[in-house]
Amino acid sequence: MQDEEGTTQERRGIPRRTIVTGAAWSVPVIALAVAAPAASASAPTGAQLEFLDGPYSVTACGTLSPVTVSLTAADGSPIAGQSVLITLPEGLTWSDGTTAPKAFVTDASGRASVTGIVAPAKNGTFNLTATSGSLSDVESVTVTGQQLLSQYWTNGGSTSTWGTLPDGSKVVGFHTYLTPDGQLWDANNLVASGVTSASAQFANTNGSLDDRVSYMQGGVAKFWSSGTGTLTFGSVPAGAVTVGDHLYLTPGGQLWNGNTLIASNVSSASGRYTVQNGNLLDNVTYVENGVAKFWRSDGVTATYGSVPTGATVVGQHVYLTPNGDLYNGNTLVASGVSSASAEVTVQNGEFYDNISFVDGSGQARYIRTSGSQPLNYTFIVPAGSKTVGFHTYLTPDGQLWDGNQLVAENVVDASAMFVNNGSQFNDALSFLQIKPC
């Protein structure tokens, strides 16, 4: 990767540097790789130490262009032969892999050139510190351009790394990823380009295992299956966004299932595809005119009048209100909820609603309702986590948890679902992880 040059920012006053006022000048005790000129015993009153041409920028994993620090007397004349100690923040390293502070000596112009600072793999803003005697200055380094690995993991032992994607990419469903420039990837297969929104899931359709991806491309609603190829839904208006399995929502609130208009004045929606007794079913949960509703392609519909106005859909007939009340149909499941996700599964011919959420106490929860085998679990995951799918949680610092199991770190986005691959049921996690240097 090429280094990026720092940009100059005008300094007003001396908000960060320290001025010596008659204090004794001391040289930091540090072993230098080369012999340094003898340092003067003290600094004049009003001496100034500062970074020049900051703040600085660099590409992730790149080497920062040389940084210059300046040491001058009160009258602006250079102070030569003085040692300046550079301290790196956590994350940055020297080119030799070390992290301890290093000393650099000012030349005849009162400047020291600091080289060999290497950026971490992760984006962020970091502060360099320069000290010399009782003088100090701080300047920021901004790291951008991190690279992401598209990853897949199941609790059944399957793991895959599909490739490297640019910063800003996101997970849109079952091992499916969308880049900032609109490339849509299913694993390591480029499905389409020029894509603006997408949603993906896995389906076992009567023994046929399919990746199913719905997307908008060039204003046109499309659907792709690894088993059947591509469909185009020409009736869906341009400007719609994908909200589920061949399910699209327009800016004006029209909700389309393929070429079929399901409802109008819809504020939020989510859809899943299921198979029951060999029948292929589209399941659509939505809010229409402030009312929570459900529609299924076999003619089943429901209205949930107990759900307050203003709720948003978070999964299979599950709704979250602005104040954190979580509803499964007409049933209040929990209050104070900060994030939630829900999906429907079919086992032995029975429908189950699977609801993952973080409750008001910060506890990660999972419940399975309906059917003959309800479940209720609490998981020990770090505070501040959010739900990203089937009992899966992502922490603010990038830890990805499947229940009580830590799956990965340095994760920036993730999506999880429960899959039946024909031989076993698995938690399937798709995620983007910062690529190490």
Image (cartoon, rainbow, N blue to C red):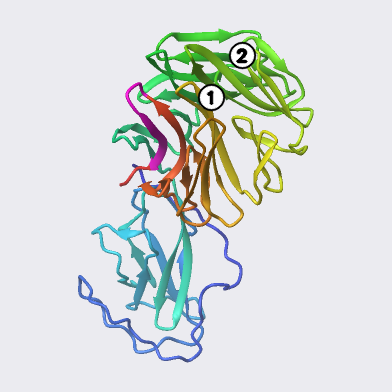
Q: Give the range drawn in magenta.
A: 421-433
Q: Can residue 24 be seen in this view?
A: yes
Circle 2: element type: loop
Task: Where is residue 210? Give x, y as percent.
Answer: 41, 17
Q: Which amino acid does label 1 sit on?
A: Ala
Name the spot of residue 293 as percent of width and height, x first: 71, 26
Please state if 335 lies on the left or on the right of 72 as rendered.
right
Closest to the observer: 102 or 8? 102
Rendered location of residue 142, percent (x, y): 47, 53
Crowd tier of the residue under label 1, counting other residues whose Cα lies within 10 Å: few below 14, some 14–19, many 20 or above: many
Residue 251 sits in which quadrant? top right
Q: What residue type is labelled 2?
A: Ser
Residue depicted at 73% across the width and 37% down the height: 307
Q: Tell whether position 425 is magenta.
A: yes
Q: Check the image and report above or below for 45 versus 30.
A: below
Viewer-side residue, 337 vs 215:
337
**Residue that numbered label 2 is attached to:** 297
Residue at the (67%, 47%) spot, across then down: 324
Which mark is drawn over residue 295?
none
Spatial CA span between label 2 and label 1: 21 Å
Task: Tell me which corner region of the image, top left, top right, bottom left or bottom right, holds residue 312.
Answer: top right
Q: In which quarter of the image is the N terminus?
A: top left
Q: Mark on residue 198?
A: 1
Q: Nearer the viewer, mark 2 or mark 1?
A: 2
In the image, residue 83 lies in the stretch drawn in magenta: no
* Residue 151: quadrant of the picture: top left
The image shows residue 55 at horizontal and vertical percentages of: 49, 58
**Up/down of 352 relative to 278, above or below:** below
Q: In the figure, 58 relative to 74: above or below?
A: above
Please identify the dominant SS of the magenta region.
strand
